[in-house]
Each structure stands twice: as C-alpha cells, then as structure tokens.
Amino acid sequence: MAAPKKELGLAVSAPPALLPPSLPRPPPPDKHKFEKELSELTEQIEAKKAQQESMSVLSDGSRGPSEQLLETQAMMDGLESEKKEILSEIKVIEERIRTLGSTFTKERDKANKISPSLKYKSEEMYEEQIKKLESQLEKTFTYLSTNDRRKLQQTIDTLKEAKIKLKDFLESRKTMDECRNEQDELRKRKDSLFQKSKNCRERVNSCRDDADRLRKEIQERKGQHKSRKAEQEALSREISELYQKRKKLNEDFRQKQNEYLAQMKAYSEEEGGAKRGGGGGKGGASNNEKTMVERDYHKQIKHSTRVEVTRRDEEVSICLTLINYLTRLSTTTNRATSPSLLRTHQTHAPSASPDELRKVLSPPLRVSEGDDVVVIHRKRGEDEEEWIPAGSRDRNSRRKARRRKSFSGQKTFSKSLQHNATIFEQFNRLGLQPPITPADINKVSDQLRGLLIKYEAGKEAESEAGDSGIMSSTGISEISDFTHMNDISLTSGEVTPNRPQPHSPSPPLLQNESGPLDRSCDTIVN
C-alpha cells in the first residue's frame, strides 16, 4: 500500500493502484523564458525608438547654414551697393578737383601776367603815390612846362591803371587760394572714401569666403541628411520587425498554452480511465474529467510557479514580512517600556493561570505563585538581579518617580533594539538598515511601504506593457490561488522564508471578574 499523499498540508487517503498511462505527462510552457525574451524585445524597441527620435532632432537642426548663407548674401549685396555709391562719389570728387585745377591754372597765368607791371602790392600805396603826384601837379602846374606836366600826368595815369590791375591780381590770387583750399578738402574726402571702399572690399571678400564655407557645409549636411534618412528608414524597418517578433512570440506562447491544456486534458482522461480500470461509464468520466484536469494542471502550475518566482516577488514578500515584524515590535516595545506597568492595583481573583501571565507579561516583570494569590515581581534595576514585589517601593522611589516622569519618554525612544541574523539579512537584501531604537520603527516602516508602492507601480506598468490575455483567466486565477496557498502551510501554520507573514493576532487579554486585563494598562491581578 502506498504512503498517504499530502497536498497543501492536508492528509489525503491513499489512491488505488493505477495503471500506467500510455501518454507521457506534458511539460508546461516555460513562462520564465517567455517573459525574459519579451522584456528583451521591449527594451530593444524602446532603444531603437529613442535613437530614431534623436536622429530626427539632428535633422531638424540642418536649417542653420542655409539661413546664415542667405544673411551673408544679403550682407554682400548691401556692401556691393555701398561700394558702388562710394566709387561714384569718388568720380564726382575727381571731376571737381580737375575743374578746380583748370581754374587755378587760368588764374595763376593771369596773375603772372599782371605781376611784372605792378610796382606796389597794395592799393594804399598806389593811392598814396597818386595823391602825392596830383598834389605836386597842382602846386607846380604854373611853373612846369608842358612836357613836364604831360609826363607827370602820364605817371599819374599809369599809377591808376596799375591800381586797377592790382585789383584783378588780388582777385586772381583770392580765386587761386579758394581753389587750392577746396582741392585740399576734396582730396581728404577722396582719401576717406577710398578707405571706405577698401573696407567694403575686404568685407565683401570675407562674406564671399563665408558663403563658400556655408555652401560646403550645406552640401555636407545634405549628404549627412541623406545617410541619416536611410538610417531612419532602416531603424523603422528594424522596429517593425521587432514588433512582429514580439507579436509572434505572444502567439507562439498562447498556442503552447492551448496545446498544453489540450494535452493535459487528454492525459487526465487517460489517467482517469486507468484509475477506474476501464469499468466506469461515460457518465463517470464526464463527472471526473474537469476535476482531474484542474488537479493535474494545478500541480504543474505549482511546480512552475516555484521555479518562476522573480526577485521582485521575493522582495515584496520580504517587505510584507518586515512590516508585520516592525508592527509587532512597535507594540511590544511600547508595552515593555510603558511606565504604567511599574504601578500595581489590587483587584479580584484572576481568572488566568500564572502560565498565561508569564506568556503575556515580558521582562522586567515575572510571576510567582503563592497559596491563594499570584504575585508579579519586577527588578530593582536594569543591572540588578534582586526581585522585589511589584507593589513595593525602594528608598529613592519618590525621587526616581519624579525623574521618571520627565525622562520616561526619552528612555522609551533611546533604548536600543535587538534583532536576529535573519532580520539583518532581509534588511540587507532590500538595501535598508533595521531600526536601532524604537523611534526609528516608524521611519523604517515608511521606507518599506514606499518600496511596496514602487514594486506595485512597476508590476502595473509591466502588466500594461506586456501582452494582455496570454494566459486564460482560469490559469491566472489558479496560479494566484496556488501562490497564496504556497506561502502558508496549512499543516504547521509556519510562514515560509521570504514570504509575507500573515498578521498574527495579539495575545488574548486576561479576564477577571471585573473585565479584561490589558497589557498596556496599569492594573494587574493580585
């Protein structure tokens, strides 16, 4: 007789002897490999899309050289027009300088002709000599002869003619000076215009060089744009191929799931027929068919689920376990450090035994058993081994009581906590530090809850990104049911390692005639 079979911690009676089925048990599809390949394809698609977007941004920035070339050409046109205006103005100035030069030459020749006949260079001297000779002529008119008077009169007339010529000479000299000054100003203007023209020529040459450089850059960018466009098209084809691969992967896995379910159904039918030994009718087979398929499929999913537990699920289980541990630790710490347990009050006879009190109360309190009463003792100090009744007081109790009122809260939150090696290992796996004092419990609990929220968000994002409907609703519900049942053993009630530990209820309250005895209150049974 075969040994009794156990499933999920429940004892099951031994089945009858089975005939060996002709069909082998089909293996389940490898979901872990499927998820790994699916994630790799998704990562490749995202990387290709990011590369395609970066290339499109680079192609949009190729308009800069064209705009710069247009601006350079406009600047060149403006400089060319300015240069033409300068050259035309220089021509006008040169024409004016030539005109002034001819005028200057005429006036100079005229002055050179007049200059030899001029005895004096000022009109005042001529007027003075004329007046002197006229006065002499009047005074000596009666004494002079006719020839002398005629000569003196000719001299006066000559001086008057010379005076007139002097005016023409001075006007010519003035015109010469004006022409010379104007020529000097025009020459200065011409020199400045020549300098401007030279600067314009240099700027035009610089713009021409810039235009040539920009044209070359535009040609290079056009070539780069063509190559980048070809790369974008190649990336688009690769992305479409990756999408097709992912679609085919989903379809293949779904087909394997369906084939596996069909094979399991046939295997279960044959196994059911072997169990009945061929004696059962069609009615019995139809009644047990669904149960057999579900049981065998459930067993296969159990095995595959144990193998396919991912690191994230394990960390979620560790988070839940540590949160429950910190919750119990916080309750125990608050109860053990409560100063109310240091005071006692007499009540009626207890309804709980001393063993129950020992389970409920924690050090520094202990329970001793008398004739008709139960006495709870406490330590005199943290380092002292002497025990005194909980209702008594030592010599410095009043002074310590006053001090305890002010520092009880500080002592509670400054007391160090002790953890075992498993707790340290679990915290180290999550990358966190365990609480050192009771004040750190809430902080560490918030960190663990934050990790849970992060894991849940990642799981939702993965489920949205993945294929919806790869597994049937029945298979998913069975996997989730098995995962929950696998976490907690129904036989022993113990929590498996790295699995969320169910919330353990607080120890039962002690009952007496007056009512329940709470561990956090300051009343004990005497």
Image (cartoon, rainbow, N blue to C red):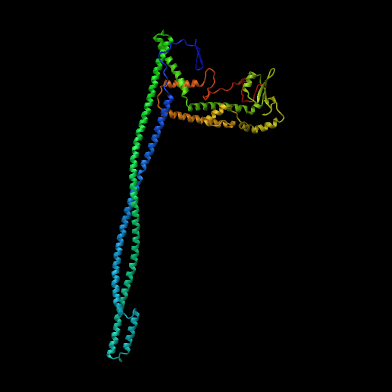
Quadrant position of residue 197 = bottom left
**Can residue 66 be seen?**
no
* Residue lying farthest to the right in this orientation: 395
* Residue 505 vertical position relative to residue 118 in the rendered view, above or below: above
Name the side, left or right, on which 414 lies relative to 499.
right
User: What x and y, as percent, mark residue 297?
Assistant: 43, 18
Name the side, left or right, on which 331 lies relative to 470.
right
**Residue at position x 31%, y 88% in the image:** 138
User: What x and y, as percent, mark residue 334?
Assistant: 60, 28
**Can residue 304 be seen?**
yes
* Residue lying farthest to the bottom in this orientation: 143
Quadrant position of residue 437 = top right
**Residue at position x 33%, y 40% in the image:** 226
User: What x and y, as percent, mark residue 167?
Assistant: 31, 77
User: Total marks drawn?
Assistant: 0
Name the side, left or right, on which 313 lies relative to 246.
right
User: What x and y, as percent, mark residue 284?
Assistant: 41, 10
* Residue 166 vertical position relative to residue 214 in the rendered view, above or below: below
Identify the image quadrant of the C terminus.
Answer: top right
**Residue at position x 39%, y 34% in the image:** 48
**Residue at position x 36%, y 45% in the image:** 64
Front-lying residue, 393 or 125: 125
Front-lying residue, 114 or 526: 114
* Residue lying farthest to the top in this orientation: 279
